[in-house]
Amino acid sequence: MNKVDTEIKNIEQKSFDELMEYSQKKNYLKFLNSFSVSSINTKKLKNFVIACVEEENLVTKLKSKPYKIIVDPTNACNLGCPLCPTGLGASERVKKILGFETFKNVIDQVKDYAIEVHLYNWGEPTLNKKLIEMLKYCEKNNLWTRISTNLSRSFKTGYIEDLLNSGLNLLHVDVDGLDQEVYSKYRRKGDISLVYKNLEIIKKIKKDKNLKKPIIELSMLAMRQNEHQHNEFLNLKEKFGADVIKIDKIQHNPNMDEQWLPENKSLVYRTYDRGESKSTSAREGEKVPCHWPWSGIVVNSDGSINPCCIIDDPKSDFDNLENNNIYNIWNSEEYVSARSEFGDKKEITKNTICNICKNETHSKRLNRVSKSFAIKI
């Protein structure tokens, strides 16, 4: 029995408290949203810790299962954001609405091991009429959920209250400008007054119903045109009824005009020219293992599987749920090849998008979907 197998065997004998103490000691919990930790049971925590140990040791064929599941309810959107392949109308993936039965099939496969389910990727999740049913099904199966919405829509009466009562754990909204002029420079076709109106409705319902969830997380993507509004935005936490409010960093196509990047270098990833902010990605030629092949899996709205959320390319798919199940895919030739890229490379049998990317997600050498930051083969 090798060192990793011995460590895994010891982990399998630990109690919940011992596993939590071990996770804190090894700083594994940094891989989870802090709000999701309270939803974990012993079985899920055990799988999570084993996954972290396998990642540390660059194991290619895993005993652990993916603990973070990204499911895209739709790859259609009501906005036209110019750094997104959907917003640009440049995606080669056919526009789809994920069916509830397909979603249910995904959840039934992962519910015993997954900790977080994120219901968004390349589209606006509220465009899927079954979103609330999906969230309720996740709550029924003890899965912590998060969605990201532009909230720039006129919803039917009662929809927002139903959304807040669906079991959703975290609602993330990007507010990328405090007035229409600034907001619409990036959130094209969006209406900041609608965003404000919906935030006010959310705040009132949560207060009137004394709802503890969902957590309301507001973010402003740091861009040159909104840089002068950052401090004012952060001071609006109470007005917006937010539990969390923050400035986030954008990802952009490094071969295109850098007009979007803020002047403040600390708000630009270090992997971009002149950036100084910490990044989990590697610089060109720098070897930094990617976290994704050991932690999460992306289910697109057409049932296809990608290894991370920055990919928008049908040719890069690892498989499709029509042909296989998640756990077979998880240790397929594609996944083993992807993980082997960061080890001794002896098990690379497929030239996957991971073997091309090498975790250099901001590299100028990578192919992009049009002017977007999304990568492709």
Image: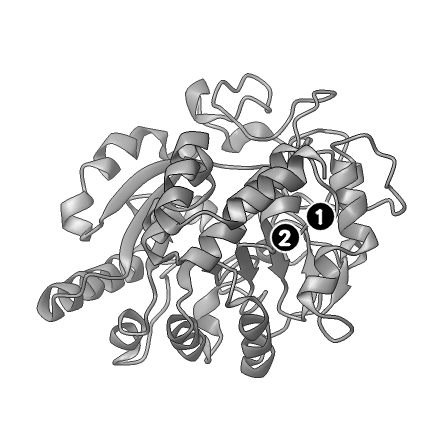
229 vs 42, left or right, is left
Q: Earlier in the sequence, mark 2 or mark 1?
A: 2
Q: Give the x, y percent position of residue 308.
A: 63, 49
Residue at image coords 61%, 52%: 64
> In terms of depth relative to the viewer, which is nearer, 290 or 238?
290
Q: Which residue is drawn at 59% across and 24% down?
A: 272
Left or right, 40 with reference to 245: right
**Left or right of 159, for residue 118:** right
Residue 367 in view: no
Residue 305: x and y in percent read: 69, 61
**Quick one: label 2, few (<14), some, or many (20+) residues within 10 Å?**
many
Residue 188 in the image: above or below residue 130? above
Q: Position of residue 256 (x, y in %)?
A: 65, 33
The N terminus lies in which quarter of the figure?
top right
The answer to whether residue 14 of the structure is visible from this angle is yes
The residue carrying pointer 1 sits among few (fewer than 14), some (14 to 19) or many (20 or more) residues within 10 Å by Cα, namely many
Image marks 2 and 1: residues in contact by CB distance under 8 Å: yes
Find numbered disc 1 in the image and state the secondary structure of the residue it sits on.
loop
Name the colour scheme: one colour
Callout 2 secondary element: helix
Nearer to the camera, 206 or 328: 328
Left or right position of 330 against 203:
right
Query: Which residue is under mark 1?
Result: 369
Q: Could you tell me the amino acid type at mark 1?
A: Val
Residue indicated by mark 2: 85
Residue at x 74%, y 41% (from the top left corner)? 339
Q: Which amino acid does label 2 sit on?
A: Pro
